[in-house]
Image: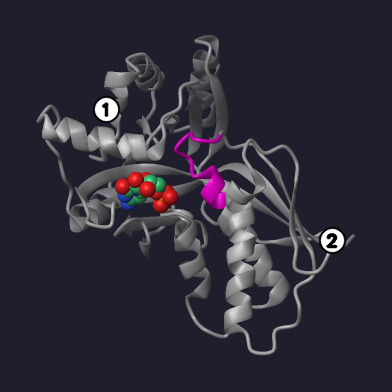
Amino acid sequence: MTLTIEAPAKINLHLQVGKLRSDGYHDLLSLMHLVDLSDRVSLRMEGKGGTVELEGNFDCRKEDNLLYKAASAYLQERQKRVPNASPAPGLTISCLKRIPAGGGLGGGSSDAAALLKLLDRFFGAFPQKGVLDEIALSLGSDVPFFLHTGAEIAQGRGEVLEPVEPLPAYPLVLVFPKWRISTPDAYASVDRLRREKADRPRSLSLEQLRESYSRPVAQWPFFNDFTSPVLLQFPESRNLLLGLQNQGALFSQMSGSGSTFFGLFDGEKTALRAFERLKSMGYRCHLGKMLARPYDPVYNGR
Ligand code: C5P
């Protein structure tokens, strides 16, 4: 028997980086929204009881893979929290990757959250509330988001979540430049620019964020605090942003700490034109739409 689920990417419509905290994380105010580009995560009950195997080509050691970490953390919690839990069967996990890694789209986090949903479906919910969220946060700051609805305001280090009404299925273009930036480095660059006073922090209050989201997309005052350091380090990304704007994007921005840029469009024709134009500039792109809800697990009985 195999359980399968689509693990969608997210984009940050707004991403405001606050102060560095004593635990090494930054406080955030962010608005995340699912999009229709997704990985596919599958779980099979196979192999020696209690073992976790990964199937496919991964570019890191098994133990460093977030899917492996998610399964191990889940099994550990189950052992601890479920009285008289039956011994776990062997788990074999595979993942069809479509979301570029390290692109600010939360691909790895979404895969991990998707696997937690599959495990929850297979083993049944924990008797205690909030365990899945705890496991998710132990795996990464934006993993909890992917357990929830399609659009959420995130605060804290990313785990304090408030659902907001998802957008209609706006046509969307994602553009994937080749360069990559590690998340900790991106945060360090924001801090460094601020120390050098080259970038004064702007800010929206939570109330302003909520209110602005209800305005027409073209009037959003949203920004991403990672954009300035990225434009400094990779000046060609300015062309990319301009490309999206010149092609009529209602709103365009970088997602997460980069490197993916996105544009929202008012119609499929305009989005297709922008997609073709950016492809002709040599960029890998995705033409799709905003996604209102996460996907449900599917059994494909085998
Ligand atoms: O939680 P996650 O594993 O995604 O975080 C990776 C790194 O990104 C952290 O070690 C930290 O350096 C940085 N980070 C941060 N503030 C956040 C989230 C992440 O400084 N809210």
Residue linked to disc 1: 229
- The x and y percentages for residue 121 are 68, 71
Relative to 137, residue 197 above or below: above
The count of marks equals 2
Residue 12 sits in which quadrant? Answer: top left
Residue 218 sits in which quadrant? Answer: top left
Q: Is residue 198 left or right of residue 239?
A: left
Q: Which mark is residue 47?
A: 2
Give yes or no for residue 104 being in the magenta stretch: yes
Q: Is residue 255 visible?
A: yes
Residue 22 sits in which quadrant? Answer: bottom left
**Highlighted magenta segment, given as a residue range:** 101-111
Q: Tell me whether circle 2 and circle 1 mark residues in contact (CB < 8 Å).
A: no
Give yes or no for residue 141 being in the magenta stretch: no
- At label 1, counting other C-alpha atoms closer than 10 Å, the crowd grade (few under 14, some 14-19, many 20 or more) is many
- At label 2, counting other C-alpha atoms closer than 10 Å, the crowd grade (few under 14, some 14-19, many 20 or more) is few
Mark 2 and mark 1: Cα distance apart in space: 47 Å
Q: Which mark is residue 256?
A: none
